[in-house]
Amino acid sequence: MSIQIKLSVHQLVDFLLRKGDIDTRVYSSTTMQEGTRIHAMYQARQGSDYISEYPLRQTITINEYEFILEGRADGIIKKGNDYTIDEIKSTVASLDEFKKDQHEWHLGQAKCYAYMFMKEQKLPTIGVRMTYIRQGKKDEKSIDNYRFSAEEIESYIKELLARYIDFYEVIVRHEKERNASIKDLPFPFKSYRTGQKQLAKYSYSIAKNGGRLFVEAPTGIGKTVSTIYPFIKTLQQNKDCKIFYLTAKNSGKEAAYSTIKILKEHGLILKNIVISAKDKICFSKGKGCNPEECPYAKGYYHKIQNIIRESLLIHSDFNYDSITQIAMENEVCPFELELDLSLYCDAIICDYNYMFDPLVYMKRYFDSDSSAYLALIDEAHNLIDRSQEMYSARISSKKFDLARKSVKKLEHKKVNSAIRRVTKVFSIMRKEFSSGETVIDFFDDATYRALSAFSLAVQDLSKNDNKLMTPELLDFYLDVNKFIKISEFFSEKYVAYVRVSSGKKKDVLLSLYCLDASKFLKRRLDAIKGSVLFSATLSPSEYYISLLGGDVQKDPYLLLGTPFKREQLLFLVAPKVSTKYTQREQSYEEIANYIVEFVSHKTGNYMIYAPSYEYQERLLPLLEQKCSHKILLQRKDMTDQEKESFVVQFVKDPQETTIGFAIIGGSFAEGIDLVEDRLIGAVIIGVGLPKINFDSDQIAKYYNSLSLSGKDYAYTYPGMNKVMQAVGRVIRSEKDNGAVLLIDERYAQSHYRDLFRHEWSDYRIVLNTEEIGEELKSFFKTKQK
C-alpha cells in the first residue's frame, strides 16, 4: 500500500532549498502585500500569449511514496508550440543581491511548475523565465532565461522528493503510532456529564462528514473535551487533517492544552503545539527581525531543517517552555520556529487571528488547499467583536505627529518627502471637516497615494538603515499598511469617516470601520472541512449564527441545558434600581448597600462586576466605607502577571471574605475557572450595554437598513452576552454552590428576560436589602446540611 503525501510547491522548496537569514526588511507582510500588487500589475500588462496564475497538479511515485504536488504558476508564456514558465519575484532589496542570496530557492520553485506543466502537456523541453522586479523603483527589473529538457527537470524533482522522504519518514512513523493509539482511545472520564455525549456525537459527525455546527452549552458542561476528543477520534480517517483550536484568551489555550494532556495520559500519541504571540515569545524584544539586530535571525533557514527533524524525534508536546528551550539551544527565532514546527503537528492551539486576521493569518495553511482542516472555535461570541476589529483600520494625526517628531533630524529624502505629503493630507482634513465625526463615501486618491508613498519610503529606510527606524515611526507605519490593506475590502458593510477633535489642537482620525465581518469569517470557514463554534452564550441564535459567518437556515444549532442542579445556584434579580447612564448618580448608595448585604451572609470569595471603570471609581469609596472586607480592584492595562496575582487570591476554604471588583466584559468576567468555594457569589451591575458611541450607532443604522433591530445588534445582544458570561463564573462543577444578583430595572422587562429564558427559569425578584438577606440566609443554610 502506497503512502500518499500531499505537498504544495512552497512546502517542498521552502523546506529544502531556502537558505539565509530571517529579514523582515526584505520579507514581511508589507513587502508581500506590495509584491502581490506588483505581480498583478505586471501580469495585467502581458499580452494575449500570457496565462496568469495557472493551477498545476501532478502525482509522482517514488518507491512506496505517492506525492501529490500542486501549486500555481505566476505565468505561462506560449509562443507557437513553445512554452515558458514565468516566475515573478519582487523585493525591496537590490536585485543582484536578492538573486545571489536566493537563486537556488527561486529557481527550484520555477522548476517544480515547469515539471508539472511539461507532464500535463507532454513537452520534450520547456523554458523557465525568472522575472525580478524592484519594489519602489519604477521599471527596475531583471530577467533570466533558462531551458531544460524533460529528463533534466524530472531528475531534479525526483531528487528533491527523495530528500524530502528522508525527513518525512519521521512523520510516517508518528502517524502510524498516532492512529493506533486513537483506535482504542477512551473518553478520559468515568462518565459523561449531562449534554456532553450529545455534544461529542454532533462534533464527531462534523469532523467526519464536514460542515458547521453552532453550540450553546452552559459553563461547566465540559465543552473543550467534548469537542477535542471526537475530533481527534477522526484523525485516522482524515488524511492531511489538522485540528485548529482557536480561542480569544490564554485561559482557552490552557484548557485545550490540559485536555490534550489528559488524553495523552489515557494513551493518546499526538503532536500538538501552542502558538504564543510574537511579542511574548521573542528573545529580542524591541529589536528588528533581521541579522544585524537579532542574533536569532541569523542563518535561520540554514539550520531549521535539522532542528525540526531532531525536535520531532524528541518531542510530541510543543508549548512556550519547550519551544523557547529548543530555540535557545539552537540560537534560532522561537516565533518562526513554532510556526515551522506547527506544519508537522496534528493539533494547533492558537489565537483567532492566526486563522481569520487578514494581515497575520497563517498563510502556510490558508493560502493553499485547506479542505482537510478542522476548526474548534472556543467562546465563539468573542469572534464577532474581534473580527470587526481585524477588518477595521484607523490612522491618526496624533500618532503621525509622534512619528514625525521622532525622525525630525533624519536625513532621508524619500521619508522626508513622504512625511510632508502625509502632513498635507491631515492639514487639508482639518480645514475641510468640522469637529466630530463625518461619514464620507471613501477617502480620495490623493490620500492613498500619500500613504503608499509613506509606506514605500519607510520600507526603503528599513532596508538600508534599520537603526534609524524609531518605535513611533514603526507604529504609524504599521497603521498605514493596515489601512491600505483594509481599503481593499471596503464595501457596503463598512463605513468610512473622519473624526476631528475639538479644541486648539485638532487631532484627525481616518477610519475604515467594519460593521459586519461575517462574509470574511464565512469565506475562511467555507474553505475548511468542518468547524464547531461553541460558547456558553449564543442566544439569540439568529444573531450569532449570521454574524459568525453561518447560515441560519442550513447550519445546525445545538442548545444544551445545564448539567448542574438548579438548587446549586440562587439567582436573584433586583429590578428596583436603574443603572442607566442618566440615572447613575442616584444609584451608587443603594447599590453599595445591596452589595454589602450580599456578601455579609457567608464568609467567602465574591465578584462584583461594574459597568465601567468610571462607575467602579465612584462606587469604591462607598464600599470601603460600608464594609471592611478585602477588595481587589481590576485596573486598566493589567499585565498577565498582575491578572494571575488577582485570581490566585481567590483561595479554597477562605477564612476571610474577599471581594473582587471587576469590569463586566473584562478579563475576569469570562475565562476564569474558580471552582468549588473559590467563588460563591457574583453581583452584576447593569445590563452590560456598551456606552453609546459613534461606531456602535453606525452598526445600529446598518442593521436597521436590513430591517433588523439595530439597537439590539449594536447594544443589547453584546451587552447581555457579557452579563451571562459573568453569571457563568459562579457554578463551574458539581461541587459548586453560589448566588448571583443582577441589579437593573431592565431585568424586569420581557425583552431582556426572553433573550436567555432557558437560563432564567428559576430566578427570584428582590426589592430591597431585607429580601436579599432573607434569600441568602435560606440558601446558605440549606448548603450547611
Image: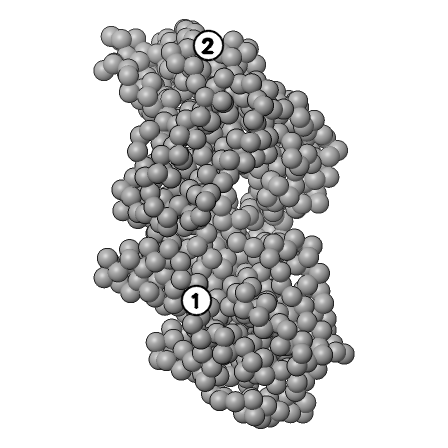
- Residue in front for this viewpoint, 45 or 469: 469
Judged by depth in the image, the label closer to the viewer, 1 or 2, is: 1
Read off the residue under disc 1: 689
Is residue 524 in view?
no
**Position in image of residue 210 (x %, y %):** 39, 52
Rendered residue at 38%/64% (across/down): 715
Q: Secondary structure at mark 1?
A: loop
- Near mark 1 (Cα within 10 A), the count class, few <14, some 14-19 or many ≥20, is many
Mark 1 and 2 residues: CB-CB less than 8 Å, in contact? no
Q: CA distance from mark 1 to mark 2?
A: 68 Å
Question: Can residue 620 be seen by looking at this rendering?
Answer: yes
In which quarter of the view is residue 84 placed? top left
- Which residue position is annotated with label 2? 152
- Residue 487 percent location from the top left of the image: 35, 37
Vertical arrangement, residue 758 with respect to residue 36, above or below: below
Q: Which residue is located at x 28 percent, y 57 percent?
A: 701
Residue 316 vs residue 247: left or right?
A: right
Q: Please say if 287 is above or below 119.
A: below
The first of marks 1 and 2 along the sequence is 2
Image height of 192 relative to 354, above or below: below
